[in-house]
Image: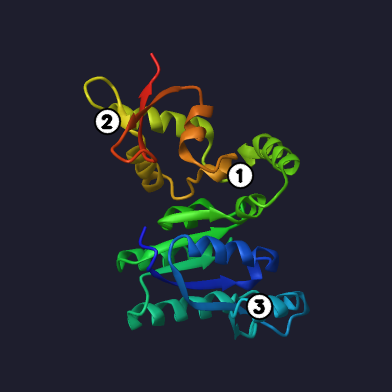
């Protein structure tokens, strides 16, 4: 990932809590540099008041959008119009759309058709079509959980496993079967495949794939936890770097 990538962050205030903003900005810094930082909502509504101090702290530009008609989401329309204006300005390499609303599915698909990197962020209730339309998708609850204490993380993982069937997150069973298939497709004659390539293909097949969703910060320990694969390391000329390879267990 190009760390110099310029990314426009567009936030749907109606569908995102202000408590997530630090995690949103920190995560985007792993992918590139935030340029446009805009948030959309009807700021006359009292429920958006908690955003005020956060916007100043993170230098986010609030875009006022009145709710002209009951039942119509004018905020979504304003965000979509701005995204297309930014696209045609050719000033950014990618977009971060922060919302749990499926109304942005078509927008994400259109931006990708234009060759832009699109990362979505939303809660675990986010509908699958929006997740699939993004190149990458990050769950806000997972980003937040990375700052919890060890005991809180254990409780979070237990609750997550219990509720997995109720969420749109890709299941472990589906990932295991996908990894086995990918290994069969790209492995050498002895059945070994480069682990980094496996991770890259998983990200392409499942935009929401992130080892942090399952309680692991790195790919190798996550794969090891599945107990379905053999992993070997190969040293390189650089003592601090080793290559990881993976094979289906007999």
Residue 99 visible in this rendered orientation of the protein: no
Residue 166 in the image, given as x and y percentages of width and height: 64, 41
- For the residues labelled 3 and 1, say whether their Cβ atoms are less than 8 Å apart: no
Among the 4 quarters of the image, the one containing residue 135: bottom left
Cα–Cα gap, marks 3 and 1: 32 Å
In the depicted structure, whether residue 7 falls above or below residue 239: below
Give the residue number, with chain letter if any, for mark 2: 185
Which element is circle 2 on? helix
Cα–Cα gap, marks 3 and 2: 48 Å
Residue 244 in the image, given as x and y percentages of width and height: 37, 33
Which of the two labelled residues, at mark 2 and mark 1, occupies the earlier sequence position? 1
Q: Residues within 10 Å of mark 3 (few under 14, many from 20)?
A: few
Taking 126 as reference, is 115 left or right? left
Q: Residues within 10 Å of mark 1 (few under 14, many from 20)?
A: some
Who's the residue at 51% across and 77% down the image?
79
Give the residue number, with chain letter if any, for mark 1: 167
Question: Which is closer to the viewer, label 2 or label 1?
Answer: 2
Which element is circle 1 on? loop
- For the residues labelled 3 and 2, say whether their Cβ atoms are less than 8 Å apart: no
Taking 31 as reference, is 76 left or right? right
Residue 188 in the image, given as x and y percentages of width and height: 23, 26
Residue 50 visible in this rendered orientation of the protein: yes
* Image quarter hosting the C terminus: top left
Numbered badge on residue 57: 3
Cα–Cα gap, marks 2 and 1: 29 Å
Among the 4 quarters of the image, the one containing residue 153: top right
Question: Which is closer to the viewer, label 3 or label 2?
Answer: 3
Who's the residue at 65% across and 35% down the image?
161
* Image quarter hosting the N terminus: bottom left
């Amino acid at each position: 990932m190009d760390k110099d990538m310029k990314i426009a962050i567009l936030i749907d205030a109606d569908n995102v809590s202000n408590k997530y903003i630090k995690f949103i900005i920190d995560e985007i810094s792993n992918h590139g540099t935030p340029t446009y930082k805009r948030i959309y909502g009807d700021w006359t509504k009292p429920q958006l008041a908690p955003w005020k101090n956060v916007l100043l702290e993170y230098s986010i530009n609030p875009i006022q959008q009145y709710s002209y008609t009951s039942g119509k989401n004018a905020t979504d329309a304003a965000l979509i119009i701005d995204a297309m204006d930014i696209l045609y300005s050719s000033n950014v390499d990618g977009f971060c759309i922060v919302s749990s609303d499926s109304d942005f599915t078509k927008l994400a698909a259109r931006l990708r058709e234009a060759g832009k990197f699109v990362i979505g962020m939303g809660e675990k209730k986010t509908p699958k079509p929006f997740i699939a339309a993004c190149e990458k998708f990050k769950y806000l609850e997972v980003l937040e959980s990375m700052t919890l204490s060890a005991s809180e993380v254990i409780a979070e993982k237990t609750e997550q496993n219990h509720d997995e069937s109720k969420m749109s997150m890709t299941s472990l069973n589906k990932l295991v079967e996908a990894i086995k298939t990918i290994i069969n497709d790209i492995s050498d004659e002895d059945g070994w495949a480069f682990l980094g390539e496996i991770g890259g293909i998983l990200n392409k097949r499942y935009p929401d794939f992130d080892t942090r969703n399952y309680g692991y910060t790195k790919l190798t320990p996550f794969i090891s936890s599945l107990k379905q694969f053999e992993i070997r390391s190969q040293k390189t000329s650089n003592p601090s770097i080793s290559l990881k390879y993976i094979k289906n267990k007999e």
